[in-house]
Image (cartoon, helix red, strand yellow):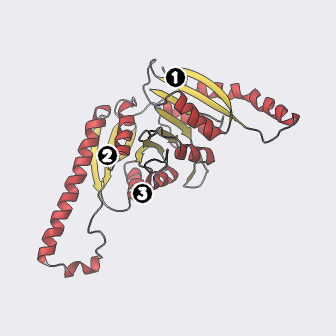
Amino acid sequence: MNILLATDGSTFSDAAATFLTCFGFKEKDTIHLFHVVSTVPYEDDFRQQVLQAIRKFSPKILNACEECIKNTKATIVKDEVQGTPEDEIVKKAAEIDADLIVMGARGVKGMKSVFLGSVTRAVAALTDRPLLVTKPSPEVSGRPLKVLFATDGSGAAEATAAVLASLPFPPGSELTILTIAWSAVADIPERYAMEINDTMKTELAKIRLAESEGGKKIIDQAKAQVAGNFTAVHGLIKGGDPTMEVLKTADEVKADLVAIGSRGLKGVKGMLGSVSRRVLGRALCTVLIGKERTTND
């Protein structure tokens, strides 16, 4: 794999680097440690002084990040540029043809929430590459991972499955595949259910059976793509609000990683879908956002 690990020298970036040590990367894999020196909003001599001061710490930032992943067998490459962080990260990912961008999200002690930060949010919206955002969470190195893969059978979901299939998960890792069955009869209020006649009940039963069978097909499709990478694979079909069900299930299975595709809008580069955006912002564990590669038609 070709991975771009963006670091700003924070403990959250170091945590993202540490998370990568969970995986069994080999020498053929490459992890690019990438630091962006932000553009300084001055045009006089003071600007150069500030830049020199900032750049003095860049090697330390990259070396500290390298120290966090010293146990990996992957080839490490270090690079630094000056510019707008989100733009440079997206540009670098395209330049090296990254299979995955990795960044760390910031947490607030004592609060059950995670703040992505403006750069992470911007990269999530701008890039057409898969993005792994690590969250402050219990230590995961050296043990199997529990992964929740939320899929709707779309092209974005297939792209996410492809990333899961290519990551060298530690032995013993477990996967739960979740699909949310959209119900054609969900809008019928419970209090009117008694008014449905026998003929309608039969038709509704057929609809629900078709929905269930559709969900099973989606799960079987996902299993075919990723099952070989996990010791155990479970399938779940749920109904309800997709965001809430994904977050709730992640909590129930004690997921270390939630994987979900971002459909976006056709023709709009990297646009982040509403469900994936909400899951990325609200999930307390690490989140992998898969995307279909955009084309310039």
Number of labels in the image equals 3
Residue 231 rendering spot, x and y as whole percentages: 29, 34
Q: Is residue 190 above or below residue 106?
A: below
Mark 1 residue element: loop
Q: Nearer the viewer, mark 1 or mark 2?
A: 2
State which quadrant residue 88 falls in: top right
Quadrant occupied by the C terminus: top left
Residue at image position (33%, 39%) is 174
Estimate the spatial distance between the alpha carbons at disc 1 and disc 2, rounded to whole Å.
Answer: 30 Å
Report the amino acid beneath label 2. Answer: Ile
Mark 3 or mark 2: which comes first in sequence? 2
Report the amino acid beneath label 3. Answer: Thr
Mark 1 or mark 3: which comes first in sequence? 1
Q: Are marks 1 and 2 in contact (CB under 8 Å)?
A: no
The label number, if any, that marks residue 168 in the structure image: none
Residue at image position (38%, 30%) is 166
Report the amino acid beneath label 1. Answer: Asn
- 10 Å crowding of disc 3: few (<14), some (14-19), many (20+): some
Estimate the spatial distance between the alpha carbons at disc 1 and disc 3, rounded to whole Å.
Answer: 36 Å
> Which residue position is annotated with label 2?
177
Q: Is residue 76 above or below residue 190?
A: above
- Farthest residue to the right: give it: 45
Residue 68 rendering spot, x and y as whole percentages: 58, 28
- Farthest residue to the front: give it: 297
Residue 203 rendering spot, x and y as whole percentages: 15, 69
Q: Is residue 255 visible?
A: no
The label number, if any, that marks residue 71 in the structure image: 1
> Which residue position is annotated with label 3?
243
Estimate the spatial distance between the alpha carbons at disc 3 and disc 2, rounded to whole Å.
Answer: 15 Å
State which quadrant residue 170 falls in: top left
